Amino acid sequence: MKIERAILLTMLIIGIMVTGCAYKSEYKLPPHIKKIAIPIFGNDTYEYGAENSLTDAVIESFLTDGRLKVTSLMDADALLEGTVSSYGKDVLSYDDYDVAEEYEVYIEADITLKDLTTGEILFKEEGMRGDTTIWHTDLALQRQESEAEGKARAIDNLAKEIVNRVMRGFPTAKWKRGILPEEEEKK
């Protein structure tokens, strides 16, 4: 009798833990969206070519992911547009001689995803960010890297984040505050 109660109690606790830890996304990409168009992004920075590099990286990330086909605007179900809004490099640490040795390289973009079937804006987020750390001195224990290597890695990180948001959901600032798009339309 005590063993049966112990087993029942254990199963109840496990059941509560499993249901309490479940994750439910508030957003799913509409099922009719199978093809996406990605025109060349805009560039509001002085970083020459950042828009081309980011566009190419986003397209490559979608091709690698494989769940949506990248196509022309005429054949697409959805349109992903973006503008590079910020690019920079910040010093993170100095060596004993006050020479900068570690930097953060970052790129930010404003992204919009539009459902071309319904005309609905599915996602709009400003300041999506991709970043990485580079070492810029031989004195560091890490391999010395150029800013160009850091820029390429930051762009790749941002491209992967964009694909992740499109495919898995969009935690925008309003969504983080608990305001869902349907509720905003009612206002």
Image (tube, rainbow, N blue to C red):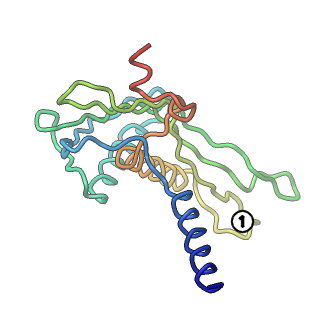
Count the numbered circles shown.
Answer: 1
Between 69 and 133, the one lying in front of the other is 69
Between 121 and 134, the one lying in front of the other is 121
Q: Position of residue 24 (x, y in %)?
A: 45, 50
Which residue is at the far front? Answer: 1
Q: Position of residue 20 (x, y in %)?
A: 56, 57
Which residue is at the far right? Answer: 96
Q: Position of residue 139 (x, y in %)?
A: 76, 66
Q: Quadrant of residue 101?
A: bottom right
Q: Position of residue 27 (x, y in %)?
A: 38, 41
Could you say whether the residue bearing mark 1 is in a helix, strand or loop?
Answer: loop
Vertical arrangement, residue 30 with respect to residue 1, above or below: above
Horizontal arrangement in the rendering, residue 161 relative to residue 52 (left or right): right
Vertical arrangement, residue 184 with respect to residue 152, above or below: above
Between 110 and 93, the one lying in front of the other is 110
Q: Quadrant of the N terminus?
A: bottom right
Which residue is at the far top? Answer: 187
Residue at (29%, 30%) from the top-left corner? Answer: 114
Q: Quadrant of the C terminus?
A: top left
Residue at (53%, 41%) from the top-left corner? Answer: 129
Q: Residues within 10 Å of mark 1 (few under 14, many from 20)?
A: few
Q: Quadrant of residue 21?
A: bottom right
Kindly identify which residue carries mark 1.
138
What kind of residue is marked 1? Asp
Residue at (45%, 33%) from the top-left corner? Answer: 84
